[in-house]
Image (spheres, rainbow, N blue to C red):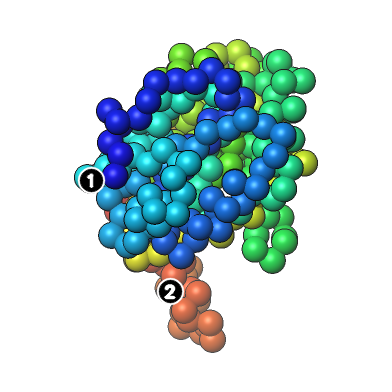
Amino acid sequence: MKEIKDILGPDDSYDLSVIIVNYNTADLISDCLNSIESQQGVNFEVILVDNDSKDRSPDIVENDYPWVNLLANKDNVGFAKANNQALKICSGRYVYYLNPDTRVRPGAFEGMVSFMDSHAEVGLAGTRIVNPDGSLQSSVEFRYPGQRHAKQEIEGLKGEIAWVLGASMIGRRDLLENLNGFDERFFLYGEDIDLCLRVRKAGWFLSYIKDAVVVHWGGQSERSNLPAEVWEKKFRAESIFCGTHYSKRAVHAIQRANMLQAYWRILTLKIALLFSTKREKSISKLEKYKVALKCLKK
């Protein structure tokens, strides 16, 4: 497999550099890459970083998709760092971050590049993301975690969109390079929210490209992890985000509010379990707030 040092230098003829970070998605990666290969109207390159997958996905990419630049890590270095590895060798005018558990609908690449070319004020944009059944998946948010306690910290930002889902988003390569890509303190989760805020702080708008459609299965690299482990990663990521962008006063207020909510929800869920006929759902919620409380106390 190719290491970073084996990849050839940049070719400025590309419109789009597609970055995919893969971890144990052997059953999905072929659908993703096949959908990319069928894209027309745009010159693009694909860089796939594998985070030491234990399934056959790296072999599938290397043997069946020779046009993909495969970077094989010997350890799972995390989502943010792996994306940054690829960013260093990108040569497209735009960088498109894409999860491996996706299928890109026809015309998506052309629509994304056309949109960015005609909206010079937009630094980064999300796409329309749908579930496998065709229903719309939430991919655009208008508020940051704990925002009501940190109004001063986000005053004066351009546009109304706070952040877009990192499973499918396109940005200007020069901007992303100037921002040093993702913050590598985020191992998984939260790195897209952080990057979007830094893009806005740099004076750019975020946007949404509704005509570029991507099917997203979601959470496939975390299938082997217990729900509590996933929730802990999400809570840790939120803590890093708030500590980075908010004042100590705001962080303290957010922690206090979240702790009170966790205590209240634990109490009410325990009472509900005494009478509930849907115990599995209540137990799952109870576990979530117990994990939240554990993270907040550290």
Task: Judge whether residue 93 can be spotted in this image.
Answer: yes
Position in image of residue 287 (x %, y %): 38, 66
- Residue assigned mark 2: 283
- Residue assigned mark 1: 75
Q: Nearer the viewer, residue 193 or 143?
A: 193
Packing grade of label 1 (10 A; few <14, some 14-19, many >=20) is: few
Amino acid on which disc 2 is placed: Ile
The residue at the point 46 percent across, 65 percent down is 27
The residue at the point 43 percent across, 74 percent down is 283
Q: Nearer the viewer, residue 19 or 232?
A: 19
* Residue 273 against residue 223 in the figure, above or below: below
Position in image of residue 248 (x %, y %): 38, 25
Task: Judge whether residue 238 can be spotted in this image.
Answer: no
The residue at the point 71 percent across, 15 percent down is 120
Local SS, label 2 = helix
User: Which tag, 2 or 1, sits closer to the chain's start?
Assistant: 1
* Residue 218 against residue 195 in the figure, above or below: below
Position in image of residue 223 (x %, y %): 40, 64
